[in-house]
Structures are given as C-alpha cells and as structure tokens.
Image (spheres, grey):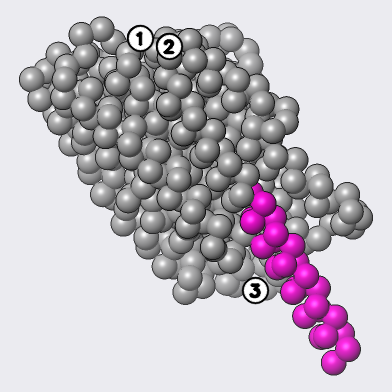
Amino acid sequence: MMSLLLALSLLWPLGVAMLVAGQVYCTPVGKHDYFSWWWLSAAWPALLLAYGGEAQWTIDVWMLGGEWELNALTRPWLAFTALLWSLAAVHARGYFAAEQQQARSGDQAAQRRLARLSLLWPLTQLGNVMLIVAQDIASFYLGFALMTFAAYALVVHSGTEKARLGARAYIILAVVGEGLILGGFLWSAGEADTPTLQGVRESILVADHGAWMAALLCLGFGVKAGVIGLHVWLPLAHPVAPAPASAVLSGAMIKAGLLGWISVLPLGEAGMSAPLTQLGQVMLVGGLAGAFLAAFYGVFQHHPKAVLAYSSISQMGMLTALVAMGLVAPDVWSMLWPAVVLFTAHHALAKGTLFMGTSISEHMPRWSQAFIWPLLALPGISLAGAIGAGMVTKWAVKSPLYEMEHGALIKLLSWAAIGTAALVSVALWRQWQQRQRGAAMAGSGELG
C-alpha cells in the first residue's frame, strides 16, 4: 500500500500537469480554471505518504536502477515540503484570482502567464518530491534538475524587466550549480562503481580525492542553499516572484541544497580524513559568515521580500554551519542531525508563511489591521526562537552542542539569531510602509 502511495505521489503531479495542458489547449478561454481543485491537489498524495509511514520502492528497469525510499531523514523532510506546497497552492488560488479574471476576459498576456505558471508549478513540485525520496543518483539528479529549471516560470511570471533580470540571475547560477553537482556525482560514482547516494558517501570518505569530490558537490548544492557568494539570485528573484512562488522557493526548494549535502557527504563517519575535516571547517566559517553578513546587509533593504530573502540566506548560513559540524566533529552528528531536520522544517513553514503574508500589501484582507499585523509577526517571532516551535528548535540545536562542549558555536548562533529578529522586524516594517503608501495612492486616486 505504501509503495503504491509512493508511486502516486510522483505520478499525481505529472497527471495534474497533463490536465492543465489539456485544458489550456482544448477548452475555451472563458472556461479555463487555472487553479482548479485538481491543481490544488498536486501535493496531497505526497503529504499522505509522509504521514503514512516508511516506504520503499525499487525499479530495476528505471535508468541505472531506481531506489526510492522514505526513512527517518526523508519522511519528515517530505512532510513539511508537501505541506508547504499544499498551503502555497491554496494561497495561489486567491492570489491570482484577479489575474485569472483578466485572462477569462480575453487578456492574452495574462492567459500566457497563467498557463505557464499553472503548468510548471506541479512539475516543479514533482521534482522537489522526487529528489527527497530518491536514493539513487539518476533519480535524485533528475528531480533536482526538473525542480530547478521548471521553477524559472515561478520567478519570471510577471514578465517585467526586473522579473526577467531576477529569473536570468536564477537560471545562470542554477546551470553553474547543476554542472558542479553532475561533475561531483560522475566522479564519486565512478570511484565507487555504484549508482546510489550511499555509494557516493562511501566513495567520498575513502577516495584519495574525496575532499575534491565533496567540494564540487558542496558548491553545486550551495547555489541552491544560498551559500554566501553563491546567493545573489535570492535577493533578485524574491522581490519579483509572486508571493506563493516565493514561499516555496525559500521554504521548500532552497532546502534541496541542504538535503543534498546531508545525502552525499560522509557526515558523522569515523575515520574522517584531514582534507574532509578542512572542508568542513571552510563550510563552518562560510556558514557563519553568511549568517552575519546577510543579516547586516539585509536590514538596509527596502523591499520586504528582499529583506526576507537575506533572512533566508542568514538562516541557511546557520544550517550550513550545523551541517559542517558533521565533518569537523563527527561524534556530534548522531545527536545533531534530528535538530537540523527540525530547524529546517521550522524555517520552511515560518518563512513560507512570512512570504505569503507579504501579499497583504497587494490584497489587504477585510479583517482589522490591529489583528492582521500581530498575526503576521507570530511566525517571525518564532523564527527568532522567542516562542513556540522556535524555542523548541533552539533547545534541540543547543542541547547536543552543549553536551559535546561546543560553547563557542552556541554563542555565535545566538548572536546570529538576534540578526534574524532584526531582519524579520525590518521586513514587517517595510511591509507596513509599502501598505501605507499603497493606501495613500489609492486615496489620492479616488480624490482625483
């Protein structure tokens, strides 16, 4: 039963994309429902799979041999990913309602934009799900590439000059990252003579040039993870992408880089070579540098989604530092990795909520603003570790570090969390300013 649900979680979004294509080309424009219930359901089988239990599916005839599995790592990863995709899809239905009405009224530009978005959204989600459940190199890389390239439509949607610039920056760095990942996979898989991610980990650990293989993969996945120096697509893409797209870009898709590291690096393994330890130290310093520099630079941004983009870079810097500990201090990884997964899930859902919340600057709900703004602040406060799941995440991360006497890293992460609080505060302030300017312009238009 679980194997059937695993297959359905991959085939369902593909079927949804085919339904969208059929609707676009075979039904009258006035009857197009770009965000139908079928479209909204694209991630539901994956969500059911994540909450249903562990599953495994092997297909020998799939490329080099397909191995798809849900385990202790990938099951919670799939849960928060599918949940965020589902929530963002529901949000998109309301967010694009006015544009859909324009398309039905004969606006051909709106028709093209919505057809492109509604077709490539489920394909992007399919790639995201596939890379999570994949345990073989071919399936993982196919899912990663599908997610990466289909997501171009999510960034370029509005078609403005700034949107094209952001999409261009995204796709250029994506191609560079894909090339580095492919090189790392081919090198390590050739050494191991196996097509599985487990084989890649083992090859990197024992090969003479394992650190160089790992470096290629670290840089390739680092593009997606928003590592400092490879992050430039994030602050360019997020301000121009629609709010639902930003939610999945920063909440779910950016985490694919992190999952890539965890899947291929020999984290926590005994017998770590000196070059791999040195690579971990570089990752640790780079992650902490990203956490602090992104926070410092982000508070001076004016667009709320640009501020949130730098917040994502800062938070991913913290996660990079934690992953690096698996190479620098392997003995701590067995206790630390569950906290990394919890941190990742919390950031995904909280940041996704914040990005979806930016849409109120364009479509203010009819609720009282005295209720709306404190409600929007809650995920930000939690992200800073002050309440709810944020406090639990902070304790989960610090506990193993305290136990293994890594007090210096705890202090640095605590200071970085202050940067998170500052960024979220600035993002909400910029959003309030944007909303007030919009209200003032609307008022002056009515008077005129």
Left or right of 91 in this view: 114? left
Tell me which residue sits at (55%, 45%) in the image: 419
Outermost residue on the bottom side: it is 448
- N-terminal of the pair, mark 3 or mark 1, is 3
Tell me which residue sits at (33%, 49%) in the image: 230
Q: Which numbered tag is attached to residue 107?
A: 3
Kindly identify which residue carries mark 2: 404
Tell me which residue sits at (29%, 20%) in the image: 327
Tell me which residue sits at (39%, 51%) in the image: 231
Between tags 3 and 2, which lies in front?
Answer: 2
Q: Residues within 10 Å of mark 2 (few under 14, many from 20)?
A: few
Kindly identify which residue carries mark 1: 331
Residue 440 falls within the magenta-colored stretch: yes
Local SS, label 2: loop
Left or right of 283 in this view: 193? left
Kind of residue at disc 1? Asp
Q: Position of residue 401 (x, y in %)?
A: 47, 17
Q: Position of residue 430 (x, y in %)?
A: 67, 62
Kind of residue at disc 2? Met
Part of the protein shown in magenta? 424-448
Relative to 222, does residue 12 appear above or below in the rendering? above
Q: Which numbered tag is attached to residue 108?
A: none
**Main SS, magenta residues:** helix
Q: Position of residue 272 (x, y in %)?
A: 21, 14
Between tags 2 and 1, which lies in front?
Answer: 2
Q: Quadrant of residue 365?
A: bottom right
Q: CA distance from mark 3 to mark 2?
A: 62 Å
Kind of residue at disc 3? Asp
Q: Are marks 2 and 1 in contact (CB under 8 Å)?
A: yes
